[in-house]
Amino acid sequence: MRKDIEFKTQDGVTLRGWHYVPEGRSGKCPTVVMAHGYSAVKEMYLDRFAETFAAAGLAAIPRPTPRASASGARATAAATCWWSARSTGASSAWSRKCR
């Protein structure tokens, strides 16, 4: 099951993404934070992998990127590794709190 989620990075940028939870699971569940790569976004087929993890009993968060249109940062061609690191850290932190 996919749910839309929203959370902030340490520097206050709003990230909007997806949280896949295995059917019939409640409470704590191991979670995979998925990173597509430096130049891609979660909409580029990560949903298929996240569905596969959920079917195997693992929750999954395809890491949202700040520069993606659904998130709160201004779009720019100057993507940086810091954005990737911050969004991965924020996704991991959110996954620990959501349980």
Image: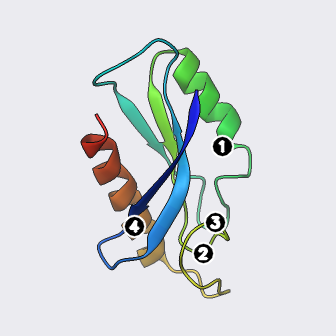
Q: Residues within 10 Å of mark 1 (few under 14, many from 20)?
A: some
Give the vertical position of 50 relative to 96 (above or below).
above
Mark 4 — residue?
85
Amino acid type assigned to the residue bearing label 4 in the image: Ala
Q: Which element type, helix, strand or loop, lies under badge 4?
A: helix
Amino acid type assigned to the residue bearing label 2 in the image: Arg
Give the vertical position of 84 relative to 53 (above or below).
below
Colour scheme of this structure image?
A: rainbow
Mark 1 — residue?
46
Mark 2 — residue?
67
Mark 3 — residue?
70
Displayed quadrant of residue 52: top right
Give the vertical position of 91 relative to 66 (above or below).
above
Q: Earlier in the sequence, mark 2 or mark 4?
A: 2
Q: Earlier in the sequence, mark 4 or mark 1?
A: 1
Q: Which element type, helix, strand or loop, lies under badge 2?
A: loop
Where residue 13 sits: x, y (%)? 43, 76
Q: CA distance from mark 3 to mark 1?
A: 16 Å
Where residue 85 sits: x, y (%)? 39, 67
Q: Which element type, helix, strand or loop, lies under badge 1?
A: helix
Q: Residue at x 36, y 69 (%)?
A: 9
Residue 5 appears left or right of 8: right
Residue closer to the observer: 69 or 58: 69
Number of the front mark, 3 or 4: 3
Q: Earlier in the sequence, mark 1 or mark 2?
A: 1
Amino acid type assigned to the residue bearing label 1 in the image: Leu
Number of the front mark, 2 or 3: 3
Displayed quadrant of residue 1: top right
